[in-house]
Amino acid sequence: MSAATLTPPVGKRDHAAGPAGAPVTLVEYGDFECPYCGQAYPIVKAIQARLGDRLRFVFRHFPLSESHPHAEHAAEMAEAAAAQGKFWEMHDMLYEHQRALSDRDLVAYAAGLGLDAARAARELEQGTYEAKVQGDFRGGVRSGVNGTPTFFIDGVRYDGSWADPEGLERALSDAT
Amino acid sequence: MAASLLQPGTPAPDFTLHSTPDQAVSLSEFRGRPVILAFYPADWSPVCGDQMALYNQILPEFSEYGAELIGISVDGVWCHAAFAHERNLHFPLLADFEPKGAVARQYGAYREHDGTTERALFVIDGDGVIRWSYCSPVGVNPGADGILKALDELAGRSAEARS
């Protein structure tokens, strides 16, 4: 079997933190209700802080809603926040409140971030971002995402353990 | 280990195994449709859990190919029942329990030294012929990209046959 490579590659539809021209790009496929993703969240944050402008970090949705009943709506709320310019603020908010992700909680977070919460609630109810989230999911499956979180470094799946922050950081540094 | 796995082009050995205490499933029931056979080492172990959760989530995509997914391990039916219930799994888990691992052995997917099955995947076509097989290291969740690629090829092949 060929090595798992990212399809589609990082592009305009993605949420990216860090310069587009950064020497290395880390992509995470994540689920806001997944406890392992919750553990990876501060690890990625710390690596972002250390690598600074040398790293571009991209987040794509991979909600395992059969295991995590709130994951799909949490992902859609992140997209609703993105539509109002606050994807990363919502991304952080969700990972910092993984145990409270009911629809009511999600709308409260939108309000807390100063978003138009009524609009976000309406979009959540109407499934405005369902296709976007499912698009991420399907792309992830094709790319060889095998659970959450799954990381890709410059488009190639990272099969080392993310729970070893030094190893992940070394792999990123080696790629720069 | 992977070398002993049944290879593409081989007719898939038929079998009948229990999926629940009072229900049995035969491979031959699925003639006419592709079957994905996923051997995995054990219910409840962390990697298997992830792998089955992933496949459970992708079931709608497998259905688009008309494909049936079947999980197989040496765990017994009651263990499978508890695992499927707890993980909300919507596909059958078969118990290769007695004689232990007999089906896995036929597919070259039995691990003698630890008494479990390999993490082995087979895609079988509607005529009951293996079209793709893959053995993943036991600790590595193989994902689903290989399965989908094999189903793509199968769909392409049957489209050609029809035209």
Image (tube, coloured by chain):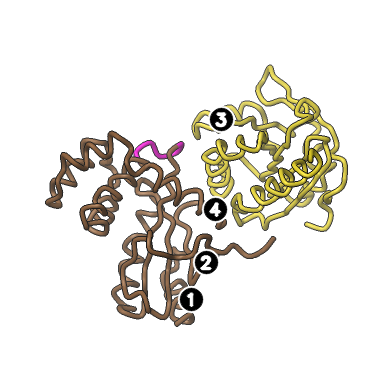
Q: Which of marks 2 and 1 is nearer the N terminus?
A: 2
Residue B109: x percent and y percent?
Answer: 78, 47
Residue at position x 41%, y 44% in the image? A131
Q: What shade has chain A been given?
A: brown
Q: Is mark 1 on a helix, strand or loop?
A: helix
Furthest residue in direction top, as rendered: B22
The residue tagged with tag 2: helix, strand or loop?
Answer: loop
Crowd class of label 4 (few under 14; some 14 to 19; many from 20; radius 10 Å): many
Question: Mark 4 near mark 3, Cβ–Cβ under 8 Å?
Answer: no
What is the drawing colour of chain B?
yellow
Dots 3 and 2: beta carbons under 8 Å? no
Which residue is under mark 1?
A171
Q: Quadrant of the C terminus of chain B?
A: top right
Chain letter of mark 3 equals B
Q: Mark 2 vs mark 4: same chain?
A: yes
Main SS class of the magenta portion in the image? loop
Residue A124 in percent (x, y) is at: 28, 38
What is the spatial separation of the Cα atoms under label 3 and label 2, in whole angstroms?
A: 29 Å
Tell which circle, 4 or 1, labels the residue nearer the N-terminal end: 4
Q: Which quadrant of the rendered structure holds the N terminus of chain B?
A: bottom right
Pointer 4: what residue? A146
Callout 2: residue from which chain? A
Q: Tell me which chain the residue with mark 1 is part of.
A: A
Provide the residue span drawn in magenta.
Answer: A66-70
**Circle 4 sits in a helix, a strand or a loop, which is it?**
loop
Q: Which of B10 and B17 is in front in this view?
A: B10
Residue type for callout 4: Asn
Q: Is residue B102 left or right of residue B144?
A: right
